[in-house]
């Protein structure tokens, strides 16, 4: 099918320009002014912004956690993603502890995802045990198109100690790969949890108190000291606060390569949500926790200055019944919240329209930077001749209200309930297929597994 998108403003990381876009099959074949193609279906996108398909580099679908499984699997989660303009998600396949291999983890995640996805998908690989066999498997993962990895400095089932952390980031760098790292000080957090329970503090309002910003910042500092010794680049995922951010700046000043990611929940919510009455605060339990208003301001400024490279979601959704598993003990509340459907609209409404970031910066954060970091540029992340025809037709004037009654998640709650948005998704093309029209899903399960190459330099 040929489509000719006429009269829209094509957005890139360097600017916006009124251009037409000609799509033939899965590819963009021409971008220019006043294009004409006799046998193409003309789509008038006057007044609309044309973004490259958004890339979400941090999702958790069909994940077993805290004695339950996320409410959204790859089928429902990627439906929500494509409705939100995301044409590629990168989820986390994981090795299991107890002598299991990376290959086993990858096969498990392919079984979860293959044939079910409404947007394209890839995987990072979480490494939870390190030995010579795991080291040999790094090349196997690269051969399978997995060039980024995940490490945890917390959670008993996932944590790696400092010795293995050093060995892993060094070995990954030798192959041209890097790890994103969940940074929290597990030991001190456990001690703070014990104190809270001993004092009878069991409600969700205690969640941010036992996982303070200092314990995120300490872990970021420790990670970066280790990475410097290993001479390896790393990414700090879901960055939440000023103290941790300042650790990243100091490391960069010392010549280190450090990437950073944050999420919408840390940009538009603050820690007052945990004190909502009637156990409402449980909806917002995630790790690291949502922080204070001044941390929000710091993160927005860092985004504008290009110091944070991507905005992902850490999508990890649960129903109210699942959250109620921690009714008597906040540490048993499954951690995570949904976000793939509203990431772009929240960033536009509360970032671009408020003047905190430019529309070009939004394109860098959601499209270009993740495409380069995760080795899919220029097939994805840009509207250019020869690129995949992943295109978001964004209506900057469309207004909406976020609600669990209308979202596509398999949940009965939304952390952004009642948030007004000004700017919303009109159409989404996935590799030349019109998947979303007038904000509604019209074709599903078109997603394919994307093999990724090595990280490319950011502009």
Image (cartoon, rainbow, N blue to C red):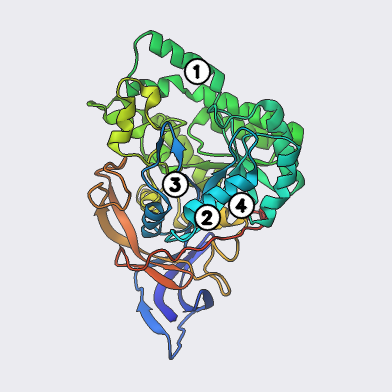
Q: Position of residue 365 (x, y in %)?
A: 51, 52
Which residue matches tag 3? 61
Q: Which of disc 4 and disc 3 is earlier in sequence?
A: 3
Which circle, 2 or 1, is nearer the viewer?
Answer: 1
Front-most of residues 153 and 347: 153
Residue 29 at x, y = what percent? 54, 79
Q: Is residue 442 above or below residue 351?
A: below
Q: Nearer the viewer, mark 1 or mark 4?
A: 1
How many marks are shown on the rendered structure?
A: 4
Mark 3 vs mark 1: which is more N-terminal?
Answer: 3
Q: Of the residues under marks 2 and 1, which one precedes in the sequence?
A: 1
* Contact? badges 2 and 1 (CB < 8 Å): no
Q: Which residue is mark 4?
A: 373
**Distance between mark 2 and mark 1 Cα atoms:** 37 Å
Label of residue 190 in the image: 1
Which residue is at a point 65% across and 56% down the rendered structure image?
Answer: 144
Q: Secondary structure at mark 3?
A: loop
């Amino acid at each position: 099918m040929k489509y000719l998108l006429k009269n829209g403003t094509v957005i890139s990381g360097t600017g916006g320009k009124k251009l037409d876009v000609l799509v033939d099959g899965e590819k963009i074949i021409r971008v220019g002014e006043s294009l004409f193609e006799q046998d193409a279906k003309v789509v008038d996108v006057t007044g609309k912004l044309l973004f490259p398909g958004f890339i979400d580099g941090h999702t958790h679908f069909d994940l077993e956690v805290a004695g339950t499984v996320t409410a959204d699997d790859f089928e429902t989660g990627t439906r929500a993603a494509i409705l939100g303009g995301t044409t590629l998600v990168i989820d986390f396949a994981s090795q299991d502890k107890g002598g299991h291999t990376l290959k086993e983890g990858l096969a498990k995640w392919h079984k979860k995802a293959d044939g079910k996805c409404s947007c394209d998908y890839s995987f990072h690989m979480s490494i939870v045990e390190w030995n010579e066999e795991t080291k040999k498997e790094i090349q196997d993962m690269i051969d399978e198109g997995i060039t980024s990895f995940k490490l945890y400095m917390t959670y008993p089932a996932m944590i790696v100690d400092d010795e293995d952390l050093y060995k892993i980031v060094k070995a990954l760098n030798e192959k041209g790969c890097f790890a994103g790292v969940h940074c929290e000080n597990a030991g001190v957090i456990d001690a703070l949890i014990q104190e809270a329970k001993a004092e009878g503090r069991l409600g969700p309002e205690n969640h941010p108190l036992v996982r303070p910003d200092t314990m995120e910042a300490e872990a970021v500092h420790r990670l970066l000291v280790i990475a410097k010794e290993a001479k390896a680049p790393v990414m700090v995922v879901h960055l939440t606060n000023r103290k941790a951010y300042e650790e990243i700046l100091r490391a960069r000043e010392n010549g280190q390569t450090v990437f950073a990611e944050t999420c919408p929940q840390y940009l538009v919510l603050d820690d007052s949500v945990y004190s909502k009455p009637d156990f409402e605060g449980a909806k917002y339990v995630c790790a690291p926790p949502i922080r204070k208003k001044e941390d929000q301001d710091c993160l927005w400024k860092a985004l504008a200055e290009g110091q944070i490279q991507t905005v992902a979601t850490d999508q990890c959704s649960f129903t109210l019944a699942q959250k109620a598993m921690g009714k008597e003990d906040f540490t048993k509340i499954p951690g995570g919240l949904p976000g793939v459907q509203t990431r772009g609209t929240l960033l536009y409404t509360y970032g671009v329209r408020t003047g905190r970031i430019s529309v070009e910066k939004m394109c860098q954060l959601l499209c270009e930077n993740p495409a380069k970091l995760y080795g899919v540029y220029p097939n994805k992340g840009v509207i250019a001749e020869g690129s995949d025809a992943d295109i978001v037709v964004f209506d900057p004037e469309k207004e909406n209200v976020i609600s669990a009654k209308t979202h596509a998640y398999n949940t009965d709650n939304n952390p952004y309930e009642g948030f007004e948005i000004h700017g919303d998704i009109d159409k989404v093309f996935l590799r030349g297929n019109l998947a979303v029209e007038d904000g509604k899903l019209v074709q599903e399960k078109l997603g394919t597994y994307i093999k990724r190459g090595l990280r490319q330099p950011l502009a």
